[in-house]
């Protein structure tokens, strides 16, 4: 969901036991080391990225729909180009699958050659798997275990956190975690600088 950056910074200030109005007054009079609002805002995208990356699939309440065309290679492996703002796959189900997948494979894992070999089968059981990789200037998703011609039936992903105006996309279930991570980072910065 799109969350207000101002609301997040207010929550961070509350976690730090700071008063926003008092901080803004001190800034007006150039009191050094009190621009916690700007600091919290600068730390927000990285805190959201880390929380999104570390959360288990069950901890993430929402994502954006992933709509991508797929093309098949000679081995029967489907490939989908991912959006530029892609950070993490949440779920993908192909039109010829009963259920979907929530995890991607490691490119260095031993599963990929097996999946590629079973993708060549024109009939029989195919092993399913998803491999995220870089291709050219962007990232693509290799989809194993689907029959040529099948399309993405359902898919969702998390976008890379980016502040746009006064909002940022963060799943509702992760907002409090992000606020606590920012507050901890601010405390760490302040203690390092003896402020």
Image (cartoon, grey):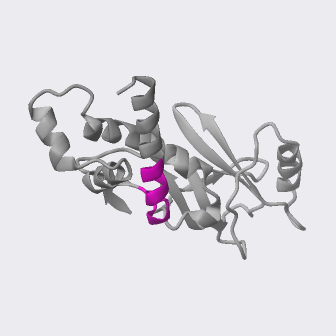
- At a point 15% along the width and 48% down the height, the residue shown is 21
- At a point 26% along the width and 41% down the height, the residue shown is 37
Q: Give residue 98's quadrant in the image.
A: bottom right
**Of the pair 52 and 89, the residue shown nearer to us:** 52
Provide residue 73's location: percent of width, then percent of height. 71, 47
**Total numbered badges shown on the rendered structure:** 0
Residue 173 magenta-highlighted: yes
Q: Which residues lie in the magenta part? A: 170-180
**Of the pair 75 and 190, the residue shown nearer to us:** 190
Is residue 5 shown left or right of residue 132? left
- At a point 86% along the width and 48% down the height, the residue shown is 111
Provide residue 80's location: percent of width, then percent of height. 59, 51
Residue 174 magenta-highlighted: yes
Which quarter of the rendered picture does the N terminus lie within? bottom left
- At a point 32% along the width and 35% down the height, the residue shown is 39
**Of the pair 149 and 179, the residue shown nearer to us:** 179
Decide: is 43 above or below 96.
above
Provide residue 28's location: percent of width, then percent of height. 9, 33
Magenta segment, principal secondary structure?
A: helix
Which quarter of the rendered picture does the C terminus lie within? top left
- Can residue 76 be seen here? The reply is yes
Provide residue 96's location: percent of width, then percent of height. 70, 72
- Can residue 85 be seen here? The reply is no
Decide: is 5 above or below 24.
below
Decide: is 21 above or below 29.
below
Looking at this rendering, what residue extends furthest in the bottom direction? 98
**Of the pair 112 and 56, the residue shown nearer to us:** 56
Is residue 65 shown left or right of residue 5? right
């Amino acid at each position: 969901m799109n969350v207000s950056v101002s609301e997040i910074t207010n929550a961070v200030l509350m976690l730090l036991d700071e008063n926003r109005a008092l901080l803004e007054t001190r800034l007006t009079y150039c009191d050094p080391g009190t621009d916690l609002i700007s600091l919290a805002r600068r730390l927000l995208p990285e805190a959201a990225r880390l929380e999104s990356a570390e959360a288990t699939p069950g901890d993430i309440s929402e994502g954006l729909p992933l709509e991508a065309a797929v093309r098949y290679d000679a081995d029967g492996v489907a490939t989908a180009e991912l959006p530029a703002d892609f950070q993490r796959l949440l779920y993908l189900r192909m039109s010829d699958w009963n259920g979907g997948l929530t995890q991607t494979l490691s490119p260095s894992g031993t599963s990929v050659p097996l999946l590629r070999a079973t993708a060549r089968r024109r009939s029989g059981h195919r092993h399913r798997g998803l491999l995220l990789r870089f291709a050219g200037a962007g990232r693509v998703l290799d989809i194993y275990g689907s029959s040529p011609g099948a399309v993405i039936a359902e898919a969702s992903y998390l976008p890379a956190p980016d502040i746009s105006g006064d909002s940022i996309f963060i799943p509702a279930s992760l907002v409090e975690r992000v606020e606590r991570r920012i507050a901890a980072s601010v405390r760490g910065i302040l203690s390092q600088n003896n402020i």
